[in-house]
Amino acid sequence: MTNSTLLWSFKNRPEVLCESIKTADATCPKSVAFMLVDGCSSSDSLKEIREFIGNIDRDIRLCESHSGTTWQQAINLGIILSDTDNCIITSSDCFFVGSGWCEAIEAELEKHDYVLADNHSLFGISKRLVARIGFLDELYGHGPHIDCDLMMRTREAGIHISNVGNRNWYRHYDPPEEEKQRREGFVEDRLPMNTFENERRFKSKWGNHWDGWEGAIKLGSQHMPHPPVHDTNIIRLKDETHPYPVIQQRYKEKYNV
């Protein structure tokens, strides 16, 4: 019996999300619940998604929203609303091509509280982890680097991050032209990748020698490295702010941390 919920956040792009759900349903045990958290999609998109999931024989919850949310707000809400001890988090444009990924992540979550399947396109966390380090930081804006912040907080707490890799289980990437567009400007209904707001917050929280994407662009570099997350000497510069302190305390009590 599984103890995991597979969690997506999304905004519009119903054809992409439905393909992700369809491929996940075909490769994931039926005992795994699915949860979709909306970030203010159009009524037409939500209607299409509701009709699609209504034809799938699986426990699927759709959390609709009438206001915009950041990725981390949607994931935090999904964690809170899920009734399992583990959440496996994926991208709305992650397509599953082989079975075994869910079983591998769940098996690793029995030993570790944070498990990557190569990267944050597909990863699992236990609610024990949330009880210990807190929810995803909602003081970041809608953009990149929140996953790196979560890794830094996990390593700071001395918690091991496991990685089961991607054994031809899924594909997730942007075509080169779309990746270029996302770095140079706003692409509708996609996570913005051309903002420096989040890297400024990251650098204000963590002491490191990362120049950031802003620095890379000033130097004329085509390489846009994410923040360093493997530093052995993590220097915290700013205290944490838990977005849901009441829920956080309940998690601490339930998971005995």
Image: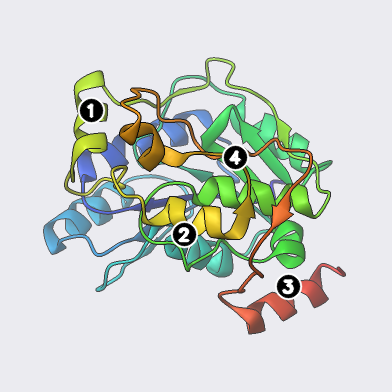
**Could you tell me which secondary element the residue under label 4 belongs to?**
loop
Seen from this angle, which residue lies furthest right?
256
**Spatial CA span between label 3 and label 1:** 41 Å
How many numbered marks appear?
4
Q: Residue furthest top?
A: 168
Where residue 41 sits: x, y (%)?
21, 60
Residue 36, compared with residue 2, is above or below; it is below
> What secondary structure is found at the residue carrying circle 2?
helix
**Amino acid identity at mark 2:** Gln
Residue 187 in the image: x percent, y percent?
18, 43
Mark 3 lies on residue:
251
Give the residue at mark 4.
Answer: 209
Mark toward the start of the polypeptide (4 vs 1): 1
Position of 194 relative to 47 (above/below):
above
Pointers 4 and 3 in contact (C-beta within 8 Å) = no
Are circles 1 and 2 on residues that touch, CB within 8 Å?
no
- The answer for how far apart the CA atoms under marks 1 and 2 are is 24 Å
Q: Residue at x 84, y 41 (%)?
A: 111
Real-space CA distance between mark 3 and mark 2, rounded to the nearest whole angstrom: 18 Å
Side of 56 where 104 appears, left or right: right
* Residue in the picture at 58% in, 36% down: 29
The residue pinned by badge 2 equals 72
Question: Which amino acid does the dot numbered 1 rest on?
Answer: Lys
Per the image, the residue denoted by label 1 is: 180
Work out how far the residue at label 4 is from the one at label 3, CA to CA, in angstroms.
34 Å
With respect to residue 219, does 41 lie above or below? below
| Left or right, residue 137 beside residue 194 | right
Label 3: state its secondary structure: helix
